[in-house]
Amino acid sequence: MTKNKLKKGAKVWCWWKSRSLYYTGREITRGGIHYYIFEDITDAITEITDEQLKKLEIR
């Protein structure tokens, strides 16, 4: 997946967590690293880096 395809509410498959995540539309930069904020069905927050974003699949 690329940043261009990322829209608020997008459902993606995170294979290393074995669950679907939903993009919140929020992004943060902490310690010089850019993160995209996702939530799962239980509202648990997951921060995804640019490199990890490439490994997600849109579902």
Image (spheres, grey):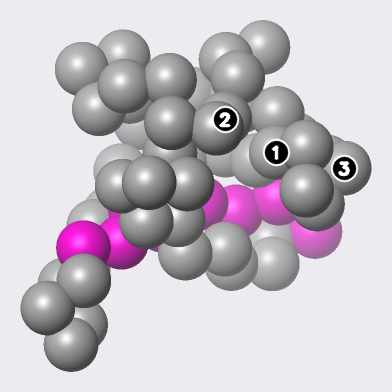
Mark 1 closeness class: few <14, some 14–19, many ≥20 residues within 10 Å: some
Kind of element beneath mark 1: strand
Who is closer to the viewer here, 5 or 51? Answer: 51
Who is closer to the viewer here, 50 or 7? Answer: 50
Q: Residue at x 78, y 48 (%)?
A: 16
Residue range of the region highlighted in magenta in the rendering: 34-42
Measured Cα–Cα span from mark 3 to mark 2: 11 Å
Amino acid carrying label 2: it is Leu
Q: Is residue 43 visible?
A: yes
Is residue 36 a member of the stretch shown in magenta? yes
The C terminus - image quarter: top right
Q: Contact (CB < 8 A) between labels 2 and 1?
A: yes
Mark 3 closeness class: few <14, some 14–19, many ≥20 residues within 10 Å: few
Is residue 39 a member of the stretch shown in magenta? yes
For mark 3, what is the residue? 18
Q: Is residue 7 visible?
A: no
Q: Contact (CB < 8 A) between labels 3 and 1?
A: yes
Direction from residue 20 to residue 10 in the image, left or right: left
Q: Residue at x 12, y 78 (%)?
A: 32
For mark 1, what is the residue? 14
Badge 2 or badge 1: first in the primary sequence: 1
Taking the view exactly as shown, the residue that stands out farthest to the bottom is 31
For mark 2, what is the residue? 56
